[in-house]
Image: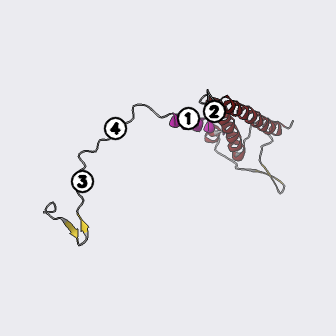
Amino acid sequence: MASKLPWILPGIRRPNFSLYGIKIRLPTTIPKGVIYFIVYGVVFYIFSGGAYHIVNKNIVSIGQSGNKPVFVAPYNSVQYLIEGIVAGLIFIAGALSLYLFEYATKFTYEINTAQKLELLGIVLVVVWYVAISMMFHAKIGG
């Protein structure tokens, strides 16, 4: 009976479409962006100390020395949660800086743009290397 009614309520008409023509297909290849997202997610998890925080049950988010907060643990066998997250973000930023080299290959015929991207990638990699080195030296007390 519902198919014979041209309207449901006054002013509202019954939709005239069929769901039989809809086909849902799975993609045959995984998009490159999804692969990059998964790889960078795994890298962030590993470099931020994800396995360490799972194994070590007493996780301290941030240390304290008197009334001052301490972000980097003074011992090699201890890691604060914030220390791992910051180190992971620095490593991810370095990896994304290395991605600029791959992105520069898309500008094969625009040499000026490719050189600028490669220079930016080199500068950022050096900046992140210095940042993680400073964090490491703060940890070992050097």
For the residue marked with disc 2, what is the amino acid? Tyr
For disc 2, the marked residue is 99
The image quadrant that residue 118 belongs to is top right
Marker disc for residue 17: 3
Predominant secondary structure, magenta span: helix
For disc 1, the marked residue is 36
Local packing at callout 1 (Cα closer than 10 Å; few below 14, some 14-19, many 20+) is few
Residue shown at 71%/33% (left/top)? 116
Local packing at callout 3 (Cα closer than 10 Å; few below 14, some 14-19, many 20+) is few
Specify the segment rendered in magenta. 32-48
Q: Position of residue 72 (x, y in %)?
A: 78, 44
On the rendered structure, is 38 left or right of 28?
Answer: right
Give the foreground label among 3 and 2: 3
N-term-proximal mark, 1 vs 4: 4
N-term-proximal mark, 1 vs 2: 1
Local packing at callout 2 (Cα closer than 10 Å; few below 14, some 14-19, many 20+) is some
Residue shown at 25%/49% (left/top)? 19
SS label for mark 2: helix
For the residue marked with disc 3, what is the amino acid? Phe
Tell whether label 3 touches label 1 (CB within 8 Å): no
**Spatial distance from mark 1 to mark 2, Cα to Cα?**
10 Å
N-term-proximal mark, 1 vs 3: 3
N-term-proximal mark, 2 vs 4: 4
